Amino acid sequence: MSGPAANRNFPVEFQRRLIDLVRSIIPVSAVRFWLVNPQVDLKGYVSYNVDAGTEEVYQGQYSHLDPMHPSRFENTDDTVICSDTMMSTEQWRRSIFYKEFMAPRHFDHDTDIFFRNAGKIIAVLSMLRDNTLGAYSAGELLLLQHMQPFLEYSLNNVYLPKRFSERELFSSKFSFTGRELDVVEVVMAGMDIKTMAGELNLSQATVKTHLQHIFEKTAVHSTRELISILFRELNI
């Protein structure tokens, strides 16, 4: 995809296409993609078949119990990790994380790809399977390991530079906060309030509050006017 349509959907479209690529190569029940900040918290979240409520519960109650959380792999060279190979099935299913978070949502197997910049994990792609799809095979994990360097290169040299440059431009021009910039990105992707809330793991009321502040800072009264101004700033 090229031209204005591609620019208008960026960066959410990049994340979705990454998820679509994985789904076209190996069977999965759900996929999560997120950016990681220096404190190894999670942000920049986009998913397939994982609702906002599930992600909120993960962040609030279970992330610290996740044996595959990226904070546990900061000082390693691991690029692809899998619940089927990092521990025995018995150990995995005895873990609190599996019993209280994974199993109730019918997720049985998890494979994560880590992406780094200067040795630090900057993003994670998590692929979940229910038991009907079975464990990840050695061949599937090898395929993902072969894909990882290209995906990491694309992330560092295509996705992040463009995303950060756009965010810096808008922040400088309009004094948007970080969360307001998140809302701006999904507005530019053409989402409605409900979809924005799901993408950002916020309530619809909170999204509306952020939008009101954004409207005030840009002197507009609607998302249509906002999109027009933002694309004009990007010379699209």
Image (tube, rainbow, N blue to C red):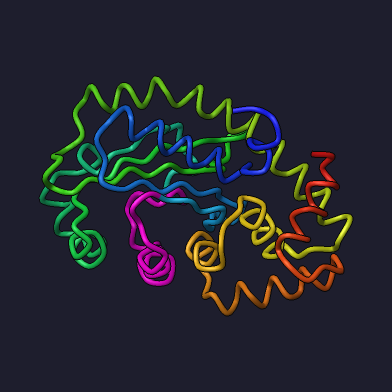
Q: Residue at x 10, y 51 (%)?
A: 90
Q: In this picture, which residue range is highlighted in magenta?
A: 48-71
Q: Nearer the viewer, residue 136 or 194?
A: 194
Foreground residue, 79 or 74? 79
Is residue 64 shown left or right of residue 106?
right
Quadrant of res 84: top left
Residue under the image location 24 percent in, 59 percent down? 102
Q: Is residue 69 left or right of residue 104?
A: right
User: Is 149 situated above or below 226?
Assistant: above
**Residue shown at the point (78%, 70%) measured from the top left:** 215
Front residue (pair 200, 127):
200
* Res 103 → quadrant: bottom left
Q: Position of residue 224 (x, y in %)?
A: 72, 60
Quadrant where the N terminus lies? Answer: top right
Residue 35 magenta-drawn? Answer: no
Percent x, y for residue 167? 75, 50
* x and y percentages locating residue 142 in the rendered image: 30, 22
Q: Please state, as top left, top right, bottom left or bottom right, where the C terminus lies in the image.
A: top right
* Image point (83%, 48%), residue name: 169
How many tags in the picture?
Answer: 0
Q: Main secondary structure of the magenta part?
A: helix
Please state the horizontal and vertical placement of residue 187, each as a whole percent of the image: 65, 57
